[in-house]
Image: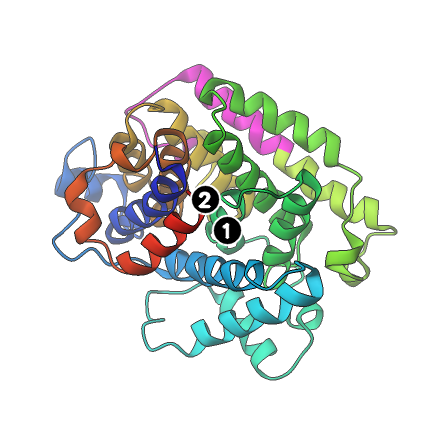
């Protein structure tokens, strides 16, 4: 089924479909694209910083896994270099997030990442790039958790950014491994409870000390608790079951980590066997439409595989060669 390819291309497809609607109102989207929102990619489909940074995470992972052992001391400088390269890339002109820019500028100036990261930020930028961590085979659950949190922590130091990124990675992994979409919300909720007091000190160092928390467990618990609240809103939205309304109405606009996860899951779970409708619903939203749609696409592709996407899209999407490399490595 080529689920790794389906997921990483799905991320890019959703990103490209949602990018033109990101700052539009629902009325404007409906006027331009109809009630269902955009459903086809243009001949040259450009992505945003979401796909660019996901590829930075993925390429760093590929290089690190080719040169074992895989450790935090090995992967951290690789990702640091990839993020700084992205900062200076002339194609980094797609309205990148301020949190990522500030953190990368700090690392570029020589600061340790734990100082450069934006400690109060739980913006969605860390979620959008974590999909590759959910596609890597062979990781233990503990390693997948820690790696997902580390890639987030390099720029987004808030515990909810870490927890939401981990949930995004596990949702991708579980779908890739065949979990039924209907079982996903309960599995994510159970994961929140199981991990609530787990702080990955070997990977995160003393990041928690930069907060007001009195212990590592208190620091990370805040993130899991906020994610649980977002999953509550997801359950409420799924119970309502509306395929036509703005997906941001209940689960949030997606500018922050837990809302991006919940709203993207909503778009996917409303159309679990129809990937184009899932990303179209994300693109037809009042919030961070490219980020919502890119995560919905990553989930849909991990579930259904590459063949579920329109075949002609593969030749239209930007960075197709890099996306192919990632998919082939982990299929």
Q: Nearer the viewer, residue 215 or 175?
A: 175
Verify CB contact (< 8 Å) between mark 2 and mark 1: yes
Where residue 253 appears, x then y in whole percent? 43, 42
Kind of element beneath mark 1: loop
Q: Is residue 11 left or right of residue 166?
A: left
Q: CA distance from mark 2 to mark 1?
A: 7 Å
Q: Residues within 10 Å of mark 2 (few under 14, many from 20)?
A: many
Determine the residue located farthest toward the top in the rendered image: 239
> Quadrant of the image for the C terminus?
top left
Magenta span: predominant SS is helix
Quarter of the image for residue 225 reads: top right
Kind of element beneath mark 2: loop
Q: Does residue 117 appear in this view? A: no
- Sequence-wise first label, 2 or 1: 1
Against 80, residue 135 (above or below) is above
Please tell me whether residue 300 belongs to the stretch shown in magenta: no
Against 243, residue 253 (above or below) is below
Q: Is residue 233 left or right of residue 92?
A: right
Q: Is residue 265 left or right of residue 161?
A: left
Q: Which residue is mark 1?
A: 124
Where residue 271 appears, x then y in whole percent? 33, 24
Where residue 286 appears, x then y in whole percent? 34, 42
Highlighted range, magenta? 228-249
Please tell me whether residue 231 belongs to the stretch shown in magenta: yes
Q: Which residue is mark 2?
A: 254
């Amino acid at each position: 089924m080529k689920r790794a390819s389906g997921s990483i291309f799905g991320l890019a497809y959703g990103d490209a479909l949602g990018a033109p609607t990101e700052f539009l109102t629902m009325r404007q989207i409906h006027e331009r694209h109809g009630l269902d929102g955009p459903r086809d990619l243009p001949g040259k489909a450009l992505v945003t910083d979401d796909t660019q940074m996901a590829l930075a995470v993925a390429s760093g992972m590929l290089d690190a896994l080719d040169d074992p052992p895989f450790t935090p001391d090995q992967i951290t400088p690789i990702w640091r270099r990839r993020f700084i390269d992205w900062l200076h890339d002339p194609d980094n002109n797609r309205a990148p997030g301020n949190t990522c820019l500030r953190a990368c500028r700090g690392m570029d100036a020589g600061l340790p990442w734990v100082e450069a990261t934006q400690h109060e930020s739980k913006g969605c930028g860390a979620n959008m790039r974590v999909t590759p961590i959910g596609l890597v085979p062979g990781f233990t659950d503990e390693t997948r958790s820690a790696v997902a949190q580390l890639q987030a922590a390099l720029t987004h130091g808030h515990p909810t950014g870490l927890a939401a990124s981990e949930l995004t990675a596990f949702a991708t992994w579980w779908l890739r491994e065949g979990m039924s979409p209907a079982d996903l919300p309960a599995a994510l909720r159970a994961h929140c409870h199981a991990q609530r007091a787990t702080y990955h000190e070997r990977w995160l160092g003393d990041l928690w000390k930069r907060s007001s928390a009195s212990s590592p467990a208190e620091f990370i618990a805040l993130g899991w608790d906020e994610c649980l609240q977002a999953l509550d809103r997801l359950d409420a939205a799924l119970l309502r079951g509306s395929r036509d309304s703005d997906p941001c109405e209940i689960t949030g606009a997606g500018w922050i980590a837990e809302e991006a996860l919940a709203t993207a899951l909503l778009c996917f779970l409303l159309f679990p066997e129809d990937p184009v409708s899932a990303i179209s619903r994300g693109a037809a939203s009042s919030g961070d439409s490219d980020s919502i749609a890119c995560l919905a696409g990553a989930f849909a592709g991990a579930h259904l595989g590459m063949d579920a996407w329109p075949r002609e899209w593969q030749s239209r999407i930007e960075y197709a060669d890099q996306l192919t490399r990632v998919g082939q490595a982990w299929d």
